[in-house]
Image (cartoon, rainbow, N blue to C red):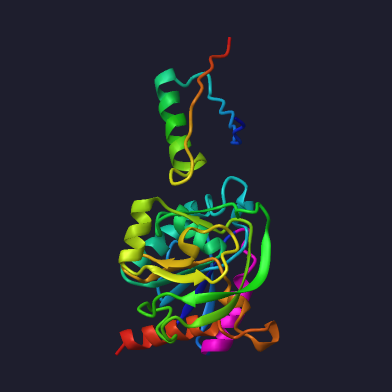
Amino acid sequence: MKFGVVIFPGSNCDHDCYYSIQAVTGKPVEFIWHQETSVQGFDAVVLPGGFSYGDYLRTGALARFSPVMQAVKAFAEQGGLVIGICNGFQILTEAGMLPGALMRNSNMKYICKFLKLRTATTDTPFTNRMSADQILNVPIGHGEGNYFADEETLKRLEDNHQVVFRYLENPNGSLHDIAGIVNSKRNVLGMMPHPDRSSDPLLGSTDGRLIFESMVNALAGARG
Amino acid sequence: VIRQGKHFDVHLAESTSPERGKELVQKLAKDVLTNPVIEEFRIVWEQNS
């Protein structure tokens, strides 16, 4: 079972993800340079936080043109686990792998702080280790985390239980307090909060571990 | 009313035909420069004299 962490030009949480996943799961982790055209051999792919390509046009807008994204898309279509954290979530929406978009925070400011998330569904490969409605202490660090989607899309997300995490106290104006969603096949998760910054007791919380442990659990199950 | 937005100047090679140019700029605006989920765009075409 092998995890891959993609490095885009401007990624800055790549090492956080690498360290957390390795420390939490004990599984091998490798970096994947964005120019790679294959993710063969990996069981899960992480799109880390940061400011890919400087995020000048829109957050995550250019990263979707990186060669590796074609491979990540194909990997997801075959059922591979993909998790996008923060900038990774923004990239997944820009790439059309998750619906909606992340707009500027409603207060127009960058927000960096710990906050509480409610687990909205345990029926995903990323939350199978949580209990229903479990509250997680996980930090955010973003200027564009204000989740937006049209009414129809929101209804579909709610009806299919694709909202995975909600903020207890909405920091950024996200519709339906959305902090994280999965695609309809439930194998692609995008979330603004950072499990990679809440997997070591030194950082104040280890609740983020549950996500990586759930992924291992799901992958172990998939292998029988 | 005050609206905030982005403005892109796109300069095409003189050899590009107006039809091809409009097609290219439309595609660029739609696929890259804007996100249709949250943005809309308008193209203003100017001919250099």
Dominant secondary-structure state across the stretch colored magenta: helix
Q: In which quarter of the image is the N terminus of chain A?
A: bottom left
In the picture, measured across the screen, residue A164 lies left or right of residue A5, that is left
Question: Does residue A166 belong to the magenta stretch?
Answer: no
* Residue B40 position (above or below residue A98): above
The residue at 53%/14% (across/down) is: B47
Which of these two is toward me, A193 or A188?
A193
Q: Residue at x 58, y 9 (%)?
A: B49
Quadrant assignment, res A223: bottom left
Residue B4: x and y in percent read: 61, 36
Q: Where is residue A37 in the image (x, y as percent from the top left)?
A: 44, 61
Instruction: Report the side of A181 relative to A102 (left or right).
Output: left
* Farthest residue, direction top: B49
Residue A36, visible in the rendered structure: no
In the foreground, A109 or A26: A109
> Image height check: is A61 above or below A161?
above
Q: In which quarter of the image is residue B1?
A: top right
Q: How many labels does the image show?
A: 0
Q: Position of residue A152 (x, y in %)?
A: 33, 52
Q: Can residue A94 be seen in this view?
A: yes
For the residue pair A172 and A48, the one nearer the viewer reads as A172
Q: Which residue lies at the image location 47% right of the left edge and 67% below the top edge?
A: A180
Looking at the rendering, the stretch of residues picked out in magenta corresponds to A9-25
Residue drawn where x is 56% and y is 77% of the image: A195
Residue B41 point in image, percent of width and height = 48, 33
Q: In which quarter of the image is the C terminus of chain A?
A: bottom left
Pick whichever, A111 or A1, lies toward us: A111
